[in-house]
Image: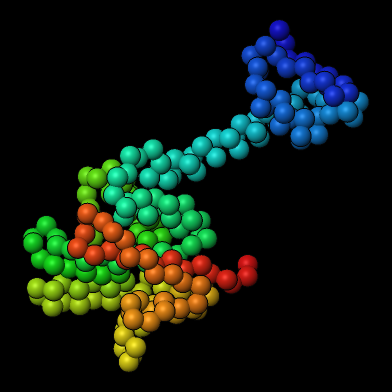
């Protein structure tokens, strides 16, 4: 049966190959209802294609969440999974502190810009348990407790302030708010500090910052 070329009143005539109630509902919402106007075949096809493209884009976006569908047992990985989407879209900026031993048995610690690492790394290996997330010398801060090597790096999201009396500070570039990682003081405006009970690391802490800058 060919595609109906006329839509009248509140009725939409769909071909037998297009038995999708959801699509029909969306077409109605897009304006094919109660107008009494004649809709051309190409107009219908264009609207149908636009809906399918939007659906595909939505599915693709969901697939970018590498934590999706993973059976996460540890609290640390669960905490990262909860924050993955918001760090992707900029709603939240998370800083991760980790202290543990590396593959050489050396104790290392550091602060990780989660949103930045998500952009430059595939976190599937971490969420699947194939590898543990550890701080690197390229992260916001890195300290090797055996060699006493200390490194600081600003990221696209944070400016590192290391030379001051208050200790290590991070300035979020979007709203210029200061994140203080000293556990003895509040973390700063619109920021929270959450210690994580985990079996994967000696110590893990998550800092969440929500920017209040108007866009």
Q: According to the image, what is the colour scheme of the structure?
A: rainbow
Q: Quadrant of the image for the N terminus?
A: top right
Q: Tally the marks.
A: 0
Q: Is residue 116 visible?
A: no
- Specify the quadrant of the image occupied by residue 66: top left
Of the pair 12 and 67, the residue shown nearer to us:
67
Residue 23: x and y, percent? 67, 27
- Specify the quadrant of the image occupied by residue 215: bottom right
- Specify the quadrant of the image occupied by residue 166: bottom left
**Left or right, residue 181 beside residue 47:** left
Residue shown at 72% from the left, 11% from the top: 2
Of the pair 185 and 109, the residue shown nearer to us:
185
**Left or right, residue 64 beside residue 70:** right
- Residue at the limit of the structure toward the bottom, as seen here: 165
Residue shown at 28% from the left, 63% from the top: 204
Residue 167: x and y, percent? 31, 85
On screen, residue 158 above or below 2 = below
- Residue at the limit of the structure toward the right, as seen here: 36
Q: Is residue 24 visible?
A: yes
Residue shown at 54% from the left, 35% from the top: 56
Residue shown at 70% from the left, 14% from the top: 15
Residue 191: x and y, percent? 46, 71
On screen, residue 167 above or below 142 = below
On screen, residue 193 above or below 49 = below
Residue 196: x and y, percent? 31, 61
**Left or right, residue 166 beside residue 143:** right
- Residue at the limit of the structure toward the top, as seen here: 1
């Amino acid at each position: 049966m060919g595609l109906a070329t006329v839509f009248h009143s509140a009725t939409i005539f769909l071909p037998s190959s297009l038995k999708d109630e959801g699509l029909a509902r969306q077409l109605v919402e897009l304006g094919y209802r109660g107008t009494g106007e004649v809709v051309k075949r190409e107009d219908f096809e264009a609207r149908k294609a636009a809906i399918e493209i939007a659906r595909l884009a939505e599915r693709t976006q969901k697939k970018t969440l590498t934590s999706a569908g993973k059976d996460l047992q540890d609290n640390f990985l669960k905490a990262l999974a909860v924050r993955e989407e918001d760090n992707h879209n900029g709603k939240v900026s998370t800083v991760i502190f980790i202290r543990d031993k590396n593959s050489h048995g050396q104790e290392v610690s550091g602060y990780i810009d989660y949103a930045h690492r998500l952009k430059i790394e595939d976190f599937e290996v971490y969420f699947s348990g194939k590898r543990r997330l550890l701080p690197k010398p390229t992260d916001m801060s890195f300290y090797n407790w055996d060699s006493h090597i200390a490194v600081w790096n600003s990221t696209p999201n944070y400016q590192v302030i290391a030379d001051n009396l208050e200790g290590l500070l991070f300035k979020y570039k979007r709203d210029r708010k200061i994140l203080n990682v000293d556990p003895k003081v509040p973390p700063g405006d619109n920021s929270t500090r959450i210690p994580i009970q985990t079996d994967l690391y000696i110590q893990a802490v998550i800092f969440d910052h929500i920017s209040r800058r108007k866009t």
